[in-house]
Image: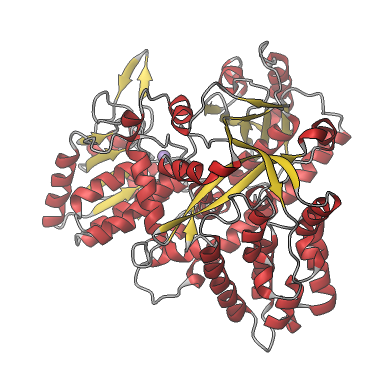
Amino acid sequence: MIQKRGFENTVEEVILRNTGYSSIEEFNNPDKDYYIKDLDKVADRIKNAIAKNIPITIVGDYDVDGVTASSIMLMTLKHMGANVKVRLPHRFSEGFGLSTKIVDEIDTGLLITVDNGIAALEAIQKAKDKGLSVIVTDHHEPVFENGVKKLPNADLIIDPHAIDDQAAFNGYCGAGIAYKLSSILVPDEIFNDKMSCFAALGTVSDVMKLVEENKLIVRKGLANMIKKGHRTQGLEGILSRQFCNQYIDETDIGFKIGPMINAAGRLIDDGAKKPLEVMTTDDLKYPNYHIADELFDLNNKRKQIVEKALPEFEKEIKEKHMELDFPLVLYKEDIPEGVIGIIAGKLAEKYDKPALVFSDSEDPLVIKGSGRTGSGVNLKELLDMSPEQFTKYGGHAEAAGISLLKSNFENAKKVLQKNCKVPVDYVKDDTIYYDLEIDADNLKDFYEKVKQYGPYGEGNQKIVFKVKNFTLTPVEQRDGDISEFSFMGGGKYVKAYGQNGIATFGETSKLIECMEDRLLYDVSVHANGNGISKENYEKLKYLIYYYTAAFTNEKGLNDLFERIDANEGFKKFTKKTFTELCALPSARQKDYNISKMLSNNKPPKKVDVIGTLSVSYFKEEFTYQVDLLKMYDPEKVLEKEQEKTIVKTDKEILR
Ligand SMILES: [Mn+2]
């Protein structure tokens, strides 16, 4: 089913509905003073400590927000000449945030927490007892005991989320707060630009609402991420590894950059220090793409682990007839704790029911699990029904972390399945909703407006638009020309959907130009006349995957890779091979499918299109890309429904 959501008729009306503001002026609020009380005091305290050469230890966290917050604080204090180091918690052996174990390691000086600390009452008391000064900067919930809020015994606390009326806005992430502090401590524009990149990464990755100052932080960060000299050299390396160094949008953070920063911390106990080290490196000569290679490889490894484990779980579900289990409760040894949440999420989505996935922990008697909801079940409430089953648990309605005795797994599973019920009002909804119907001739105005109100994501969801009677024209085919595949295809991809606006509008040609540069650079680095190393060959495969993903289905890609392996092999791989391969039909299968579909319906063919728009930062401008949710012949809509012809977007394929 396809249905209009709401009665709104303009972009502004949809924005107000989605964000809950009563007027566009209030949503924009360009001159609002985003103060945080006590931030000056914190700044003075830090300046004092530096003046007296007091050692400073920053304690952050291992997720993207924790690492970016730590990066900001570390670089800021170093810039000020501080004697400073960072200690990130070890994911498996220590768990989240500041612990008494970490406090034990710090002999003297000033301890500053970022993205954690508000709930570390015991550890902070211990630090104070040892004579340390403690500054907490955090955005998490405080501890409540018998309904009474208990704050840590720190010298100063910044947590607008935990402390009422501490700030004009209380939705910052850890990196956002670190960024605010950094802006006071180092009022240097270019330095501040570099820090804004980290703040934007933390804000989007921690799924903060993209309103108020968060909106401004993310805009600023995205704009700087594509500017040489306004991002650290290390971050540039990370961005370039994901092809986001020249143009980027907010979803790239969530799907490409964030996962790469997270990967090391997911797989290695103290892995989070790797992205910290990379991101805070800023003294290399450009280009520096290689410095992020380790993170890139770890992220691929993380993907491989998930890709390998997922079918194993699915097989078990099938073999043991667990399809009707509700929730799914599964255990498998040897799966890194850091990826079980990803697996639980994928299973929950696939089976549309809650999924709890367990694997071994550092303690042989205890297994650790991660739960994700499905069918509208509140996971927190479910776990609260049988706390005696777990050694530790926590979380919220959608996601939870659980530890339990290995010997109690089967029993806990039974109890969970007995207690878990589908909420009575839950109905699975496959309807594709759109917000606005746009006339094909007005697309350009629509894009301009969409751009104004971004970034989109949490708290400001993308506007889904429908264009009726869109004119499709067949795709031209010019095989063998390198400028014709890949991102040149990006332009073509768009072109395939009509010439009324999308194709001819935007900065597609410039985008093509810059992608071509990147492509040729990568090919020349990885493949010279003497072939390439096996390691670089793997990277090159990924490049091909990336460049062709917009057109290629899974089978097409596999065909392509098989062909490379069988006929060429990495030893013979050259730029020429690359060019030839890219011209192969299998690399362009989706392109062909679209062409076929179009030529079967000799032009001009009118279709209805439902999609969202991605607005990427590019140089001083923007580029636009349509993420297609559905394209259908309105006359054959029923037939199409049955065929489920939802065309995947690049992002879905890459995911
Ligand atoms: Mn956070």
Is residue 425 visible in this depiction of the protein? yes
- Which residue is depicted at the point 69% across and 16% down? 422
What residue is drawn where x is 75% and y is 57%?
Answer: 474
Q: Residue at x 68, y 50 (%)?
A: 497
**Side (left or right) of 9 relative to 560:** left
Q: Quadrant of residue 423?
A: top right
* Above or below for 328 versus 77: above
Determine if residue 94 is in view. Answer: no
Residue 363 x/y as whole percent: 59, 41
The location of residue 256, given as percent across then percent down, is 55, 53
Q: Nearer the viewer, residue 354 or 200?
A: 200
- The location of residue 351, given as percent across then percent down, is 75, 31
Q: Residue furthest top?
A: 424
Question: Measuring 33% from the left and 37% from the top, which residue is drawn there?
Answer: 138
Quadrant position of ligand 1: top left
Q: Is residue 279 above or below residue 359?
A: below
Left or right position of 218 against 533: left
